Image (cartoon, helix red, strand yellow):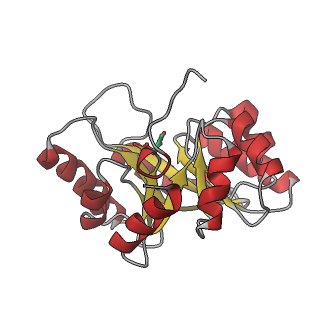
Amino acid sequence: MSISENIKHITAQIPEQVTLVAVSKTKPNALLLEAYDAGQRDFGENYVQELVDKQEQLPKDIRWHFIGHLQSNKVKYIAPFVYLIHGVDSLSLLKEINKQAQKNNRVIDCLLQLYIAQEETKFGLDFKEASQLLLSDEFKELKYISVKGFMAMASHTDNVEQIKKEFASLKTFSLQFPDLNILSFGMSGDYKLAIQEGSTMIRVGSSIFGERNYNI
Ligand SMILES: *Cc1c(COP(=O)(O)O)cnc(C)c1O
């Protein structure tokens, strides 16, 4: 199937209130434009330089989501235009985003990345750390960021029950913070399950653009 068919296929399966973020990392502009021409406006990227280049070259009404692991010293490059930063996992990173947002005279929307998987390699805060951060005075002083919800990745496993349990734990946690209602979870392999478990924003790459080749 073509990119536009893939997008139509996925869009037809998801409720209207769920946002589809097309994850376009490593993919050339021509493919992003194909998605754009099919009506797609939310795109997700993992690497700062790649995101900056694409933002310069592609239509200005694209909403750019940063979904990778963001280093503090690179926030300044995306601060002028980024639409939503998904993977925030420390107060110090939030402070840097706040500082760069202020310099750009804007408020930057963020999601806190939560750690729900069994694996030890994933980034993110545990539930207790996330609560402490959100309730801290230091956090409340940050006027140029707005935390809108949470982002997470499930374990890399075929065990559907395990993935379901992890997604459900995130949804349950989020209910303590009713204003933070963007829940970013679900990728190509598990987005249907994710929506069943309460996701409001899915990040889909290979099911739209095909497999990634990191060697090119
Ligand atoms: C690459 C990536 C995705 C998309 O993964 P697919 O399996 O290709 O859909 C989603 N979220 C994050 C954080 C990613 O790095």
Residues 5 and 153: in front is 5
Q: Is residue 126 left or right of residue 23?
A: left
| Number of marks in the rendered image | 0
Find residue 203 and report its horizontal and vertical position in percent: 46, 53
Q: Residue at x 30, y 47 (%)?
A: 189
Q: Residue furthest top?
A: 215
Note whether 214 is above or below 12 in the view shown: above
Q: Residue at x 68, y 48 (%)?
A: 30
Residue 184 found in image quarter = bottom left
Note whether 87 is above or below 73 in the view shown: below
Find residue 73 and report its horizontal and vertical position in percent: 74, 31
Q: Is residue 200 in view from this perspective?
A: no
Residue 126 found in image quarter = top left
Q: Is residue 176 in view from this perspective?
A: yes
Residue 154 found in image quarter = top left
The quadrant of the picture occupied by the N terminus is bottom left
The quadrant of the picture occupied by the C terminus is top right
Q: Residue at x 56, y 35 (%)?
A: 69
Q: Quadrant of ligand 1?
A: top left
Q: Residue furthest front?
A: 1
Note whether 52 is above or below 36 in the view shown: above
Residues 186 and 28: in front is 28
Q: Residue furthest bottom?
A: 16
Residues 4 and 82: in front is 4
Q: Is residue 132 left or right of residue 86?
A: left
Q: Is residue 102 left or right of residue 138?
A: right
Find residue 201 and report its horizontal and vertical position in percent: 44, 62
Residues 137 and 3: in front is 3
Note whether 44 is above or below 123 in the view shown: below
Q: Residue at x 37, y 25 (%)?
A: 121
Find residue 81 and report its horizontal and vertical position in percent: 77, 55
